[in-house]
Image (spheres, rainbow, N blue to C red):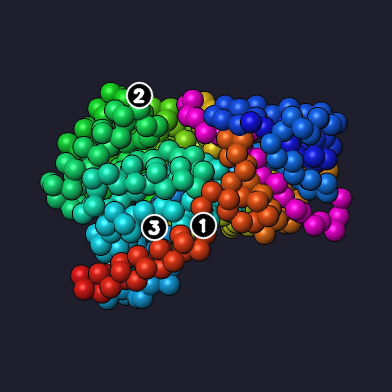
Amino acid sequence: MTLYLKDATYVDWETLELKKTSIKVHRGPGGKIEFAPKFAEEETDTVLDCTGKLVMKSFACGHHHVYSALARGMGAPKRIPTNFHEVLQYVWWTLDKCLDLKMIEASALSTALYCAKNGLTFVIDHHASPFAIDNSLETIAAAFDKVGVSHLLCYELSDRDGLIPRQKGLEETENYLKNKNQGLVGLHASFTVGDHLLKQAVTLAEKYNSGIHVHAAEDQIDQDYCLRDHGKRVIQRFSRAGVLAFPKTILVHCLHLDPEERNLLQKSPVYVAQNTESNLNNNVGIFNSSGLGDNIMLGTDGMHGDMLRSAKAAYLVGQSVEPITTDGIYQRFRKVHHYLKENRFTGDGENNLAILDYDTPTEIRQNNFTGHFVYGIDSRHVESVISDGRLIVKNRKALTVEEDEILHFSREMGNKLWEKMRKL
């Protein structure tokens, strides 16, 4: 089964070379694409006229939170937070305690839908639902599969809710990994993870050839608690525990680091996920790549599912603290693909494509593409999306699911969630 993209302008995602060509897209994980001036159209299943349109590798998110999807528009917390720890306590830790499996399903479906319509075909997610843990990862995976978006999931292990949620989280993680699902071992952050749980997480990652997905030094509180409770800084603690030994490990945020911690990260094989808009929203600081090396990718931290928007924010805000260029931010935008390929995760092959109807008033070339990327191209230009060779969005409408049904279900579950939160 093949898909034929007729008369496209193909943009090579690594070299940015533009090529006018037609493209045959083969279906299935690891499927290839072929370039030729023309194909016998009768050999294909679907033909899309891409005259005047850009075709490029689709997008991926390096750090997301499905569980936050139903937060949009919810009421103010019972107590207005005055610092980051209180934001967690009165907003996110209130919300995640109220989730049930139906709410998680609605969150995952709506997240996958919005991601797909914004050109994403792969999402790395970090999930938390301390009183609805059993089968939560399978529920998210099934929802993403239904939409057609590939995924790398984990459950956020923490000591903050006591022994039972901690044990259930470990069991959920191990069950998911031993069933041959591609996943990571999730941890919330150093300041809610004791030494015993940290050791258990590292052991699980070793057992299943995985890695750790954890928030690191998002706020100064993470460092303060680590120094108080463990006598060392966050990255030093993670390094000594073995977290930095895994090439699959993702450290999220990494704002409040000293030079020694940055050096430890640069010398390790791990990746850092930058989440500029979330950092601004929580007033915790601005990301600075100094001394961290090149393994930096972009995420949304659950704020939304629009990676083009994330890249623009990271570039515009980043200029105040680091010498970031349009080429540099494009490389961070695409770094997630290197992470997935280096670690042999499936679902991000050549046959994942976005078709953009980019109505530019100026010429687009190889040597000015990143200028268009930052200042011109945005999610409204995403017309169609191909995942594993299958057309999942066409003319800005999802083909794999009924959008209205998902949105109705999500609104129903959102109201139910908000009511539970009000009573907590």
Mark 3 sits on what residue?
Answer: 106
Q: Quadrant of residue 124?
A: top left
Q: Earlier in the sequence, mark 3 or mark 2?
A: 3
Mark 1 sits on what residue?
Answer: 402
Q: Earlier in the sequence, mark 3 or mark 1?
A: 3
- Disc number placed over residue 152 in the picture, else none: none
Secondary structure under the numbered disc 1 in the rendered image: loop
Secondary structure under the numbered disc 2 in the rendered image: loop
Q: Pinpoint residue 323: horizontal percent, then vertical percent.
A: 64, 47
**Residue plotted at (67% across, 32% down):** 2
Q: Can residue 219 be seen at all in this image of the molecule?
A: no
- Residue 61 falls inside the magenta stretch: no
- Disc number placed over residue 209 in the picture, else none: 2
* Amino acid, disc 3: Ala
Q: Residues within 10 Å of mark 1 (few under 14, many from 20)?
A: few
Q: Quadrant of residue 368?
A: top right
Secondary structure under the numbered disc 3 in the rendered image: helix
Q: Pinpoint residue 345: horizontal percent, then vertical percent.
A: 48, 29
Judged by depth in the image, the label closer to the viewer, 3 or 2, is 3
Q: Earlier in the sequence, mark 1 or mark 2?
A: 2
Residue 135 sits above or below residue 418 on the image: above
Q: Pinpoint residue 295: horizontal percent, then vertical percent.
A: 52, 35
* Residue placed most toward the observer, 66 or 383: 383
**Residue plotted at (25% across, 62% down):** 98
Going by the image, does 158 lie left or right of 268? Answer: left
Quadrant of the snapshot with the N terminus: top right
Going by the image, does 137 lie left or right of 424? Answer: right
* Amino acid, disc 1: Glu
Judged by depth in the image, the label closer to the viewer, 1 or 2, is 1
For the stretch drawn in magenta, the main secondary structure is loop
Q: Are marks 3 and 2 in contact (CB under 8 Å)?
A: no
Question: Residues in magenta?
Answer: 343-364
